[in-house]
Image (cartoon, grey):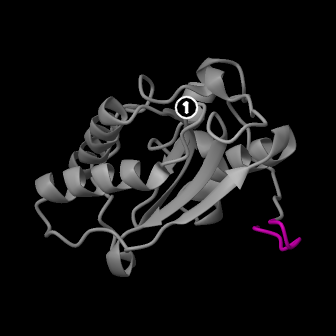
Amino acid sequence: MDQPKWIWTDTVQPDTVQPQATTGGSHFFFTLATSKRQPVLCRTHEIQLLRSAFRFAMDRRPFNLSAICVLPDHLHCIWELPAGDCDHATRWRLLHSWFAKYYRGGSVVWQPDYCERPLQGTEELDWHLDYVHFDPVKHGLASRAAQWPWSSFHAYVKRGLYPPHWGEHIEMNDASGERWL
């Protein structure tokens, strides 16, 4: 897998991570998988296409990309939608169609459904931020979050929201209490 320079720095906006109590203006956690879990997102070219697809969707239906981690066969991200706007489905359709149009590997790139979860409160948001940034370690793709280049973790470190060596000796549990490591 080729290792690009950090590519989400000007797209991810960690300074906006403040949960709000209203619908719209709230944060949502998403998991999006590739079709048949094929490792589509392995090279710099596909990562750059995905980044461009996000920009395309954001330009047409604005939202803040609060966090993201792209793995070979899926991604996790946290979005903040504008106040009064909860239409993430249109944004995903824009992103899916733009990526599929320019991806050389065929038109069926994504699984038809995605996991969506509205985040309520700071504790839930913080847990999901950690989940997003720790996922490459969980899947054995890196020994710590800082080693994975396709993550907003680096933007969070740059802004002092995570220490650079975060996740080296961490054990995280999911909501059911199951340990990841």
Position of 144 with respect to 166 (left or right) is left
Question: Which one is in front, 141 or 107?
Answer: 107
In the rendered image, the vertical position of residue 61 relative to residue 92, given as above or below: above
The amino acid type found where label 1 is placed reads: Pro
Q: Is residue 178 magenta?
A: yes
Check the image and report above or below for 143 versus 36: above
Q: Looking at the picture, tell me which residue is in the foreground, 119 or 128.
A: 119
Left or right of 146? Residue 149 is left
Residue 15: x percent and y percent? 64, 20
Q: Can residue 1 be spotted in the picture?
A: no
* Left or right of 101, for residue 16: right
Residue at 48% x, 48% y is: 87
The N terminus appears in which quarter of the rendering? bottom left
The answer to whether 62 is drawn above or below residue 143 in the figure is above
Q: Which residues are magenta?
A: 174-181
Where residue 98 sits in the image (x, y, percent)?
A: 21, 50
What residue is at 23 percent from the left and 45 percent from the top? 49
Q: Main secondary structure of the magenta part?
A: loop
- The image shows residue 97 at horizontal and vertical percentages of 22, 56
User: Which picture quadrant has residue 18?
Assistant: top right
Residue at 55%, 37% in the rendered image: 81
Residue 127 seen in render? yes
**Residue on which disc 1 sits:** 82
